[in-house]
Amino acid sequence: MVDAALLDRVEASVAVAEDALRNPDAWAGLVEHPTAIARLQAMDRGFTEICVVSLPADSATERAKARGHVLFTQLVDRAHRAGELRDDVDMADLGLLTWGVVRATDGIRDVAPEAWERHLAILLDGMRSGAAHPLPGHRLDPALVRNAMALTR
C-alpha cells in the first residue's frame, strides 16, 4: 500500500534527476537536483520519509529510488569531473545536507515556508570548488547517513 501511495512522488524525483542531467552545465544540473528534491520534501512529509525508509527491494518504489540514486551519482560525478564540485564532497554529504536543511526549517514552515531555499543555496555555494577550504573530519559512510536520517522519524 505504501508502495502504491508514494510511487508517483519517487518517480517525480527520478524525472527531476533526468532533467538535471540534460542540463549542459554540470554545476547548474547538480544544483537543480537537490533543490527540486528539497522542494518535494518541504511540500510532502511522506516523500521525505520514503527517501530514507526501505521497502522490499522488488517494490516499484525501491526500483525507482535505485534509478534515482544512479542518476544522482552521475550528477555528482559529472560535477566532480567538470571541477565544479569540491573533490571532498560526496553523495552522502549532499544527501544529508539537503535533508537537514528541510528538517531544520520544519519548525518555521508556517511563517517562512521557503526558508529552506535560502539555506540550501548557502550550503550549495559552499560546495563549489572555488570555495573550498580543507574540511574537518572524514567522509561519512552513506549507510550510516541513511540510518541516521531514518531514526529521526
Image: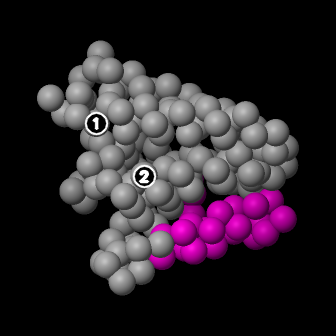
Q: Position of residue 56 (x, y in %)?
A: 24, 23
Q: Amino acid at mark 1?
A: Leu
Question: Residue 107: which quarter of the image?
Answer: bottom left
Q: Quadrant of the N terminus?
A: top left
Q: Secondary structure at mark 2?
A: helix
Q: Please determine whether, in this image, residue 125 is positioned above or below residue 70.
A: below
Real-space CA distance between mark 2 and mark 1, rounded to the nearest whole angstrom: 12 Å
Circle on res. 6: 1
Q: Residue at x 47, y 72 (%)?
A: 114
Magenta highlight range = 115-140
Q: Position of residue 46 (x, y in %)?
A: 26, 49
Can you identify the residue that label 2 sits on? 40
Q: Amino acid at mark 2?
A: Leu
Crowdedness near tag 2: few (<14), some (14–19) or many (≥20) residues, C-alpha within 10 Å: some
Which residue is at the front of the view, 28 or 126? 28
Q: Which residue sits furthest left?
A: 1
Q: Position of residue 91 (x, y in %)?
A: 57, 45
- Residue 16 is covered by the magenta coloring: no
Circle on res. 82: none
Earlier-in-chain disc, 2 versus 1:
1
Q: Residue at x 47, y 56 (%)?
A: 38
Give the total number of marks visible in the rendering. 2
Q: Residue at x 73, y 34 (%)?
A: 22
